[in-house]
Image (cartoon, rainbow, N blue to C red):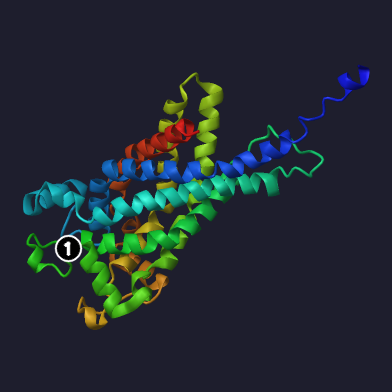
Amino acid sequence: MAADVRNPVPPAPAPAAKEAAPAAKNYKGFVAGVFSGIAKLSVGHPFDTVKVRLQTTDASRFRGPLQCVMQTIRNEGVFALYKGATPPLVGWMFMDSVMLGSLTVYRRLLRDNLFNPPWHPLHDPARPLPAHGHGMAGILAGSTVSFIAAPVEHVKARLQIQYAAKKSDRLYSGPIDCLTKIYRHHGIRGLYHGLGATLLFRSFFFCWWGSYDIFSRWMREGTNWSAPAINFWAGGLSAQVFWITSYPSDVVKQRIMTDPLGGGLGDGVRRFPRWRDAAVAVYREQGWRGYWRGFLPCFLRAFPANAMALLAFESVMRALP
């Protein structure tokens, strides 16, 4: 009888099952990311169109964001603010799925293999990943998604700077036409024009995801807000931190992506063979202010678009089994 009491050892496999659970649930981040992408595009694309138009023109065309909005609506109609929305609608769903899905995987890998490995004598299963660990996961996720984002953002940017009201007067009739023409004349390399600038820009995801963790932790400990409210506010504020730190690199990226590719495409002569050439051109044209042209619509867009995106992401993450 005593032997029977001492021998209830069957629960031993539990740790293995527990260990397998995180790997089995990696799919959640990828699924939830789709909903994040839809929310982000719905709220943010008109701001993005204004931002790109300001970034790629000088003050002689648009004095500021309000004039850009009014002139765009007057000359091209309200739906012109959603020009180029098709590639990012599909793209953001896929991109946010890959970015947020890979982010959850990188967070777990960094926690289990670098910051809190199970074999370490000070291992504590309850210890969360530190803020800089979240930032490192952000850089890795940003690099991963850049290989999808670069061609999507390239096509989007070229469509957004077509100012002709009539489709027949535009070089590209739509995203498929744009993609086809670039591929026909410049191949895969042409579609990936601006990849280096995209990788540099997304390295600032360190600031986004590091600050998201800091804001979330502070709100959990210092307020009695609900989880969705924390996701909303932390998502919006951390996105603004990201754009404040990364915006100059985005201006240079947009200049590179809208630079004529030349050749058989017939869109003009290429001006920026290197990242440095585009960065210098911005400074020569407008001084240091050129690196912040179009910042206001971007900053105004950052909070609502990303707050809604992260609210959608975290809510779906909680809802999935």
What kind of residue is marked 1? Gln
Residue at 7%, 54% in the rendered image: 75
**Which residue is found at the position 88% from the left and 21% from the top?**
4
Q: Can you give x and y, in whole percent of width and height, for residue 68 in the image?
A: 17, 51
Residue at the spot of label 1: 162
In the rendered image, residue 272, in percent from the top left (x then y), is placed at: 34, 74
Q: Quadrant of the N terminus?
A: top right
Q: Nearer the viewer, residue 160 or 117?
A: 117
Please tell me whether residue 40 is drawn above or below residue 125 in the rendered image.
Answer: below
Q: Residue furthest bottom?
A: 263
Mark 1 Cα shell of 10 Å, populated few (<14), some (14-19), many (≥20): some
Vertical position of residue 115 compared to residue 18: above or below: below
Work out which residue is located at the far front of the displayed protein and give it.
1
Q: Quadrant of residue 44?
A: top left
Which residue of the protein is positioned furthest toward the right in this rendering? 2
Secondary element type, mark 1: loop
Tell me: 306 left or right of 107: left
